[in-house]
Image (cartoon, coloured by chain):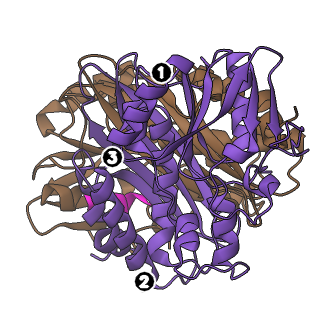
Chain colours: A purple, B brown
Amino acid sequence: MSLPPEFSLIGRHFRPLAGEGALDLADDAALLTPPAGQELVLAADAMVAGVHFLPDDPAQTIGRKLLRVNLSDLAAMGADPLGYLMTVALPRGTPDEWVAGFAAGLLEDQREFGLSVLGGDTVSTPGPLTLSLTILGTVPRGQALRREGARAGDDIWVSGRIGDGWLGLRAARGERPDPDGALARRYRLPEPRLALGRALRGLAHAAMDVSDGLLQDLSHLCRAGGVAAEVEAARVPVSDTTAPIAALVTGGDDYELLFAAAAQDRARIEAAAAAARTPVMRLGRFTQGEPHVTLRDAAGQDITPATLGWSHL
Amino acid sequence: MSLPPEFSLIGRHFRPLAGEGALDLADDAALLTPPAGQELVLAADAMVAGVHFLPDDPAQTIGRKLLRVNLSDLAAMGADPLGYLMTVALPRGTPDEWVAGFAAGLLEDQREFGLSVLGGDTVSTPGPLTLSLTILGTVPRGQALRREGARAGDDIWVSGRIGDGWLGLRAARGERPDPDGALARRYRLPEPRLALGRALRGLAHAAMDVSDGLLQDLSHLCRAGGVAAEVEAARVPVSDTTAPIAALVTGGDDYELLFAAAAQDRARIEAAAAAARTPVMRLGRFTQGEPHVTLRDAAGQDITPATLGWSHL
């Protein structure tokens, strides 16, 4: 009594990723007893070959990128990872070795970030490889970081470096020098700032992750908080000071945390970041006024680009 | 301070679908307090235009089909709907009216089935429209229906009619008569058997939904339970007795419940089904033996087709 090929594929490559509650991926759905005293945090993202990753990116990094993008959403809420469900639309004729590499990459990240697969679906497509992932996390009740809450006078903080996604895409395409491959790696494997997100619970007034360009994402914090923002270009941490700053502050795929905190909490923020082993930088201030983002050069001139970030459509 | 077009699209079409915990689809993730005493039930499915639905199916039914396919997974576990996350990869240039119709269909089903959207992602694709949906449901702790548990001597039961997915696809393509459009509608809008699933808690020994062909799905119950199955072809409820029975019992997209129950519980099953206003039919019996499915005609001849169901790859 033989089964169609997807059962063999799932059994060989995806079942080893299944964790508690996944019922070996052999039932209609997963069963999960939610941890007491916690809220569930849920996010979903999709990626399409040629749009969100390069069609010739290594199989090992493609699933990990999507997982990390979703983990970054958990980090932005101050949440801990619990599990995920993934659907994969595979182009017909995708070699088995490709699927093996894809799953091996996921397994590596499951171990690194402490979560496992709960369920999913594998289908075929006449189009490009298309992945969708729903992540589940937990956060102690009432302690989730939110986008709303930035106040006039708050500092604007960001983790890591801004524009590495933009630089990394160009490095991966061979358009920019990248002697040690660090930038291309950054594009393919963003670093979800989970430890920092956790450390910011009860400390940051508002937070989100930078996925579509620093300035555009900052504009969301402004809108949600009813405040304006002033960013000093010279304070934005970048990997390449010769690259155009307008590109770095509007490029996508950085997956850093952007957050608001009271000016008197600077030392606490720096201590929390150090404990989380995550570099952070103060970029400027939230101010009173209509929701608006201004980027200023060292002379105080307004150098805000006309387009603040990346568009998905 | 303008935003890219996806924000307007999400705001106009998807935000009205957002429910409690979705944070207006304006945060990085949704926040949900899981109901006490319940287990969470989680499933994900993907659909690709031209593979899982017809590219010219009405916008109003496409999202609903995916939602109903996932609701059918909840029904198979005896679960109640809670919410869902959906990612949509839209072909570039998809008209706004299409998205409006797509969302209007979803809203209709959200009302019918009592759930709402928790989150998602909208991206563009150079390929066909590709949707992915993760559904969340709840079931009282320890009461989920599972695929394992069928015993030798149990009756094999199924809800509704088998082969309507196969007939409906052909009707939708204009290849079969369908004077009142009922079959095409069935293909586009399957009926998740939530009330029946709920009524079978504590009564069925094993259950699943029929999505990839009755016989193939029955083989899963056999494998999970370590039993064989004998199906009487004459008892299989079909809409068109002139259609080839081998096609009807192996065709996909039926989304009926298939379940095992003790022979002495026949009257209880019939009462539960009547209370759930869902027709059910006894198809045959589970028997001792290696996991195996046999379809027999009225004379007792083995007429099992060589291929038991639909393949996704």
Mark 3: which secondary structure? strand
Prevailing SS of the magenta stretch = helix
Instruction: Name the mark nearer the viewer: 3 or 1.
Output: 1
Residue tagged 2: A96
Instruction: Name the mark nearer the viewer: 3 or 2.
Output: 2
Q: What mark, if any, has residue B208 been given in the picture?
A: 3
Q: Camera-side residue: A277 or A89? A: A277
From the top left corner, tell me how far across and down residue A233 is, in percent: 75, 45
Q: Is any part of residue B289 visible from this angle?
A: yes
Q: Please provide the residue range marked out in magenta.
A: B211-220
Q: Is residue B212 magenta?
A: yes
Q: Which residue is drawn at 15% across and 55% down?
A: B225
Answer left or right for B87 relative to B50.
Answer: left
The chain to which mark 1 is attached is A
The chain to which mark 3 is attached is B
From the top left corner, tell me how far across and down residue B230 is, in percent: 23, 60
Mark 3–mark 1 distance (CA, rounded to whole Å): 55 Å
Instruction: Name the mark nearer the viewer: 2 or 1.
Output: 1
Q: Which amino acid does label 1 sit on?
A: Asp
- Dot 3, how many residues are within 10 Å of its Cα: few (below 14), some (14-19), or many (20+)? many
Contact between marks 3 and 2 (CB within 8 A): the answer is no
Residue tagged 1: A265
Mark 1: which secondary structure? helix
Quarter of the rendering occupied by the N terminus of chain B: top right
Q: Camera-side residue: A26 or A38? A: A38
